[in-house]
Image (cartoon, grey):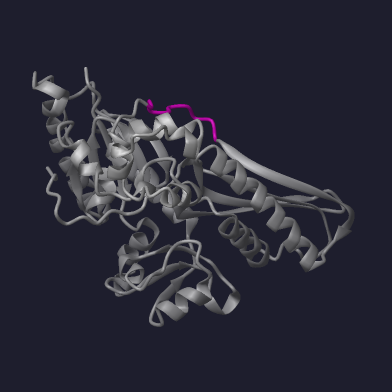
Amino acid sequence: MPRVILHLDMDAFYASVEQRDRPELRGLPVIVGGSSEQRGVVCAASYEARKFGVRSAMPSRIAARLCPLGVFIRPRMDAYRDESRAIFRLVAETGVVVEQVSVDEAYLEATAIVGPSGEAGGDGDLRAAVPIAERLRAEIRAQRGLTASIGIASNKLLAKLGSDFKKPDGLTLITERDKVTFLRPLPCRALHGVGAVTAEVLAKAGLNTVGDLQDHPGDLRALVGSFGPVLKRFAFGEDDRPLELGDEVKSISSETTFDRDTADRPELRACLRDQATEIAGKLQRRRLAARTVQVKVRYGDFTTLTRQISVEEPLTDAKEIFRFGCWLLAREDLVHRPLRLLGLGVSGLGEMAAVQLALPWAKLSG
């Protein structure tokens, strides 16, 4: 039986929680992250702030220049995690199988709970999931005071694109018969696994849209190596990746033990920069992105501390990872004495972020 996959993505989650809990912030450009006066970094931004170009991982001073009236809010990670648990209790009540990607995002498989329709291509089964998605969105709105966007399709690739398509508060069904047409105008960067480097390689070959990939007569392996055949399948909306249901936390990290304990800022920044470059390289080779950055320090007496921060938009870039590592060291005052060891890591790993879609001509919502 064809699969029925939903992708749930909370809308501007961190900022929306702040706006819900503090009504005076509603309608204002809220920026969750460090202060622009303290060399902070943006963790999340409300849609009002995004209109000014504010994005996750941006230095707060740049965000303040782009959005002078932005309201900076210090992250409350415990509050966001508590809210996430409440939302996923509502998700569990639907009976779907859940792969939780982060505090505000999940793939849901409803294959076993929608009745077979007998319609060719499984589109009837997909349409049968629309009421499930509508009820879930309504429950989240009524009980949690937040909005969510959901995409429905036959696989993870398309469901993710669907949830991005009409944000915020959107519901998009991508049927089997419409999927190739839906994909054609999208930028290549919208496809899972296509990061900035791969997109640049494709663009140099004249491949800018998914339609270009669909029409390309050559072997994509000449451009992107072993990813070529997979990319071609993705371009036609074919994706057989299963939901990942394991509880193991995946992470990538790098640590450096110094010959002599040091509190020298330039040396520590250089160390973090090298570690961030190493981590970003591993992410890009595995076509993954990270939602959480963690620093680890060990002092001369072997006391060891770790601190972390999570962001809404997945990270792949070394500069962004480095920026959050520096911010954590400064925010937590971790270099108040010389360090024996410094480590940087990322977790909350998932697929590379797709660009947010905005194609008003398409009308595929349920």
Q: How many marks?
A: 0
Q: Where is residue 26 shown, x and y percent of the image? A: 28, 71
The percent coordinates of residue 109 (x first, y second) are 29, 29
Name the quarter where the C terminus is drawn: top left
Prevailing secondary structure of the magenta residues: loop
Image quadrant occupied by the N terminus:
top left
Decide if residue 3 is on the left or right side of residue 312.
left
**Which region of the structure is painted magenta?**
241-249
Which residue corresponds to the image point at 37% horizontal and 44% vertical from the top-left? 105
The answer to whether one can see residue 306 in this image is no
Instruction: Locate residue 358 relative to residue 60 in the image: left or right.
Output: left
Residue 322 visible (yes or no): yes
The image position of residue 78, as x and y in percent, is 48, 53
Q: In this rendered view, identify the residue nearer to me: 182 or 269.
A: 182
Asked if 158 appears above or below 186 in the picture, the reply is: above
Residue 16 in which image quadrant? bottom left
Q: Residue at x 48, y 62 (%)?
A: 75
Does residue 248 show up magenta in the picture?
A: yes
Q: Is residue 246 left or right of residue 212?
A: right
Q: Please say whether residue 100 is one of the residues in the magenta stretch.
A: no
User: Looking at the picture, how far across and down is residue 159, in whole percent?
Assistant: 28, 38
| Outermost residue to the front | 217
